[in-house]
Image (cartoon, coloured by chain):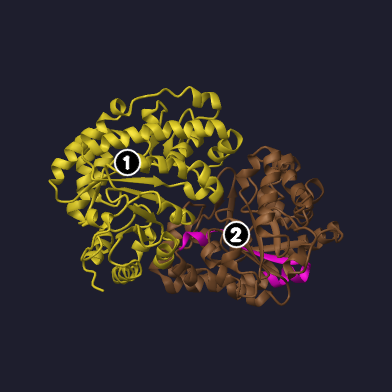
Chain colours: A yellow, B brown
Amino acid sequence: MFLKALKGEEVSRPPVWMMRQAGRYLPDFMKLKAKYDFFTRCRTPELAAEITVMPIHQIGPDAAILFSDILVIPQAMGIDVEMRPDFGPYVPNPIRTPQMVADIPQNDAKVELQYVYDAIKVTKQMLNDEVPLIGFAGSPWTIMCYAVEGRGSKTFDKAKGFCFQYPEAAHVLLQKITDITIDYLKEKVKAGVDAIQVFDSWGGLLSPADYNKFSKPYIDQITGAIKDISPVIVFGKGCWYALDDYSKTGVSALGVDWTLNPKMARQLAGDKVTLQGNFDPARLLSPIPEIKSMVKEMIDGFGVNRYIANLGHGILPHIPVDHAKAFVDAVKEYKK
Amino acid sequence: MFLKALKGEEVSRPPVWMMRQAGRYLPDFMKLKAKYDFFTRCRTPELAAEITVMPIHQIGPDAAILFSDILVIPQAMGIDVEMRPDFGPYVPNPIRTPQMVADIPQNDAKVELQYVYDAIKVTKQMLNDEVPLIGFAGSPWTIMCYAVEGRGSKTFDKAKGFCFQYPEAAHVLLQKITDITIDYLKEKVKAGVDAIQVFDSWGGLLSPADYNKFSKPYIDQITGAIKDISPVIVFGKGCWYALDDYSKTGVSALGVDWTLNPKMARQLAGDKVTLQGNFDPARLLSPIPEIKSMVKEMIDGFGVNRYIANLGHGILPHIPVDHAKAFVDAVKEYKK
């Protein structure tokens, strides 16, 4: 059903999954989190697979998304990335000069990220064709944000400043990230993922003009390289202004955050592309009957076809499990 | 010129000022910051006035904005707010229950915030009618974000969760903030400010439907109460979807952030309201010639009339002073 929606084929109800559905709101996930640190979970195929499959049986979405992190790419490029508890990503030696960009080695995604492809194979066996498996990558701009800023940020001013002060070096860095990301995603498709999602989490920090310089062209390269071997979903958080342009790049679907309503999103993106989204993750704190009526309203707005029900961003850690399940159930129960 | 632009009268070039222009990028400000803590600077009329006037002579904008903080309102309501160095606002006892909302006393803005009105009087004397003085307040939703969350946040989930779990109490709290804000702004106008700006810094975290429930109606109450005694500028960061509706509420101008280009902004807001914005603050890190050509492009896009040149958000702390001045100069030198 998920793959049919990506192809634009008719469905009886929209498929549903949730960004970060294999995450901290699940008590069983928290048990594994207490035992294994973040990158151990990513790098141990059996653990990554177990976490990936967890929400399929506990919550019931129509697609699984591989447990991993967008920051495995800078790691594969030789940039140290740590995941610090209660702090988030931390890069001890962030990229701050053109020379540091030039010095980044040309590592091979096939070799460096073998553990991801292994995790995909184990996960596919565990899923046993019950639901399709999504693989993902960060957009080159979003990866650059962390590589330059060195940590999470509200505004990523250092990363933006690098683009504005050293535009040439910025483009070299973005191209290096793009090249390894394309190799990485090709290997993921070979290993068995059924669709690819590109997360441009920080695209919305750029002006439309800068977005078209520093983010979209690199995502378009990825789409161009992957779309013939796998459907591609592009999710640019805060990038409503780019929906129209993206709809013409060969993507199968476009993610939409909750800051636009379904009608606006459809108007901006046109009717030839599947849309995915866009329930406000914080709205899962509402009482269950309200969640269910808001989900119905959302589907009424997007329509049943060319639509994948999802949140407008990742699920929050403190969402009650029965609220998450109510969201998925409401989509499954949908009648016009 | 600033007041003419607010009235929609013809001007020879757009007026210019910068949000947070009296801020950390100015070396003289940093000297005062080293000597006096944040709220001492706000509460000492001579200090607040000195800081307010500082950029007028050093950078040359066409309007001054009173040095103060949006969080003086929760303080006046009896909610403790600290400003912690390298951390930002901190509320030791955030509002987390409907009972805490009910318990908020009805303090009098006239009495509690006398130091602000005194600062306005001193500032007006120092400005000597050289440029007009802007007074401001946070939107009720944005104030509620801090009062409930207790600190800065990327997503303000606790504040949003409060709205979604206790909508009635949320509306009571928002109305209490609105009432004291209206009294406060009326006193500011009496004390001498020439225009009022309402900052809805966190409006963009809400979906359009929730924005129309929890933020816009309260801003509209403020606009309605103030517009006949002072021009009102509403700046909703990330609230591009509300520009059309706001243009019909009696505001004199609407602030625009840098995530939409001038043409989109004008199209959304219509041609009957003045627009203010929207240079990406991080773009002040570009080389000066590029800043100047981008400013020209921005004014070409917005047009000379019904437009106030500004940044799309506050100026960043690490902007070189000559880059800030180049921004202001470029507006003053503008020729079509």
At which x and y percent is residue B59?
78, 47
| Mark 2 secondary-structure assignment | helix
Q: Residue at x 79, y 63 (%)?
A: B11
Where is A127 relative to B206, above or below? above
Q: Residue at x 43, y 74 (%)?
A: B168
Chain holding disc 1: A
At which x and y percent is residue A6?
28, 54
Q: Which residue is mark 2?
A: B263
The magenta-colored residue range is B185-206
Mark 2, Cα crowd under 10 Å, few <14 / some 14-19 / many 20+, is: some
Q: Residue at x 21, y 36 (%)?
A: A191
Q: Which residue is mark 1?
A: A226
- Look at the image and tell me in which quarter the N terminus of chain B lies: bottom right
Q: Nearer the viewer, residue B315 or A208?
A: A208
- Look at the image and tell me in which quarter the C terminus of chain B lies: bottom right
At which x and y percent is residue B286?
64, 39
Q: Nearer the viewer, residue B52 or A212?
A: A212
Q: Is residue B311 left or right of residue A179?
A: right
At which x and y percent is residue A250?
36, 49
| Mark 1 secondary-structure assignment | helix
Amino acid under label 2?
A: Lys
Distance between mark 2 and mark 1 Cα atoms: 34 Å
Same chain for labels 2 and 1? Say yes or no.
no
Mark 1, Cα crowd under 10 Å, few <14 / some 14-19 / many 20+, is: many
Q: Is residue B222 visible?
A: yes
Q: Nearer the viewer, residue B34 or B207?
A: B207
